Amino acid sequence: MDLNSSPSNYTIPVNGTIPVASTFASATAAMENALPANGSGDRKPIALWPGMYHSPVTTALWEARGQIFERLLDPPRDAPPQSELLTRTPSQSRTSILYNFSSDFVLREQYRDPWNEVRIGKLLEDLDALAGTISVKHCSDEASTTRPLIVVTASVDKIVLKKPISVNIDLKIVGSVIWVGHSSIEIQLEVTQSNEEGNDSDSVALTANFIFVARDSKTGKAAPVNRLSPETDHEKVLFEQAEARSNLRKRKRGGEKREFENGEKNRLKALLAEGRIFCDMPALADRNSILLKDTSLENALICQPQQRNIHGRIFGGFLMHRAFELAFSTTYAFAGLVPYFLEVDHVDFLRPVDVGDFLRLKSCVLYTEVHDPDQPLINVEVVAHVTRPELRSSEVSNTFHFTFTVRPEAKVTKNGFKLRNVVPATEEEACRILERIDADNLNEFFRTQEEKQQLANNVSRSSED
């Protein structure tokens, strides 16, 4: 697909890959094609639709699926809901986007970070945008007479960086639906890039799992989504793993704030002991430790119309980008060395954020791990609050958990580098730390089980061959 072609002719390419162009190139092409030669036209290019959040990827995706998104922007009045659910396969929703970094200088500059790698914050935006497009594609019944569903990001289960992502080599993201429930959808995305220039074999640089939920565009209530029928053995394994994660999420929601058993109460006391010394006898506190509250950073913003998504709410990828930047800065100030991103451990989208909302982002280091001296771990929490001063209210809209280490080349320049231990000053802080450590340990257990299952499946397929 050529992004410089007439917008009315946009279709998904035969190979299913959507090329990404710089926003400057897209905007220029859009203005050139805004009106036909006779000066009339019934639709503006999506790149010129007012108010929506624009990036190279969102522009490419919206143009590629312009007809579907136009229905979401202007749904048929009093149209009935979809009467019959369809059965789709993962391959029907599979979509990929290609960043031509090696040949597009402007695009490369839009994504470059100070270390000649891809900016992770912008990549998080793109992952959310692509996952949303895939979920819309799966939910669409391709009928112009029915009421389209609204799909919103519910949570991010995991985003794992497996290797550095160069900004000088072409990059590809491939994603598809891997599981559906009654009204929820899980999307898995893989970012691939060759190991070096001229190497044709791509390897996975990053994996991500997003969970979306479908809502009726008229009532706002949960709406059933099209069924999913995995075809290959790999798709069936992914479906089973996603089902297990869904059941785990349900158990967590059912338990909410759990009561701590006797053994866990001892863990709480041990965590609080050092914090109390900081509060009561600061001169005697361990110099290698720091209070959780002293690792905090905060920023605030008014959410603008230019940051909204196609449904008029603030784009979830934009929120993740802002949270990532704050978490990175928090890690930098805490460690004293340039951080290196490893994982998004979990993100919850608890309530929508609207245009005009006063959003406050608060971050802190929850805990550190130094089992591996070559890769010390720093777990950072960011909580987003929608604040309404006129009502004297503040509600949590999002929680984000990130894991960083420090860049190896920075660590070698600082002899005797050592991370400080984070200690809580209150029982509430201690509970947050323990709950996050336990959640990370549980996720690690499930990841190990999945890897064992995948290895067993590979061995089984090899023996059959």
Image (tube, rainbow, N blue to C red):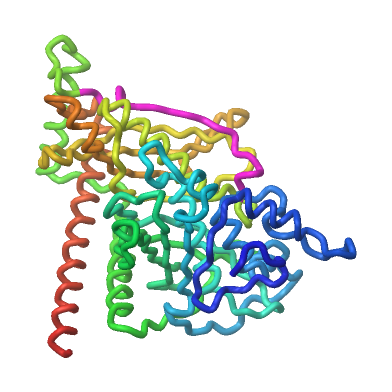
Q: Which of the two residues, 312 or 3, is positioned nearer the viewer here?
A: 3
User: Is residue 270 one of those drawn in magenta?
Assistant: no
- Residue 70: give x, y in percent of width and height: 69, 66
Q: Position of residue 343 (x, y in %)?
A: 30, 49
Image spot of residue 301 (x, y percent): 55, 32
Residue sitting farthest toward the front: 198
Q: Left or right of 115: which side holds 372? A: left
Q: Which residue shows up at 46% across the image and 43% down it?
A: 321
Quarter of the figure with residue 90: bottom left
Name which residue lies at 72% across and 74% down.
79
Which residue is nearer to you in this view: 146 or 174? 174
Relative height, residue 20 to residue 305 (above, below): below
Q: Nearer the viewer, residue 247 or 103?
A: 103
Q: Quadrant of residue 249?
A: bottom left
Q: Position of residue 275 (x, y in %)?
A: 19, 23
Q: Quadrant of the C terminus?
A: bottom left
Residue 273 can be seen, yes or no: no
Direction from residue 264 to residue 250 in the image, left or right: right
Residue 173 in view here: yes
Please identify the residue farthest to the top as the structure is shown.
283
In percent of the image, x 63 and y 48: which residue is there? 24
Tell me where the magenta segment starts and ends, as one range: 290-308
For residue 304: magenta?
yes
Q: Pick the quarter of the image with the N terminus.
A: bottom right
Q: Quadrant of residue 238?
A: bottom left
Give the residue at x 61% y 68%.
65
How many marks overall? Answer: 0
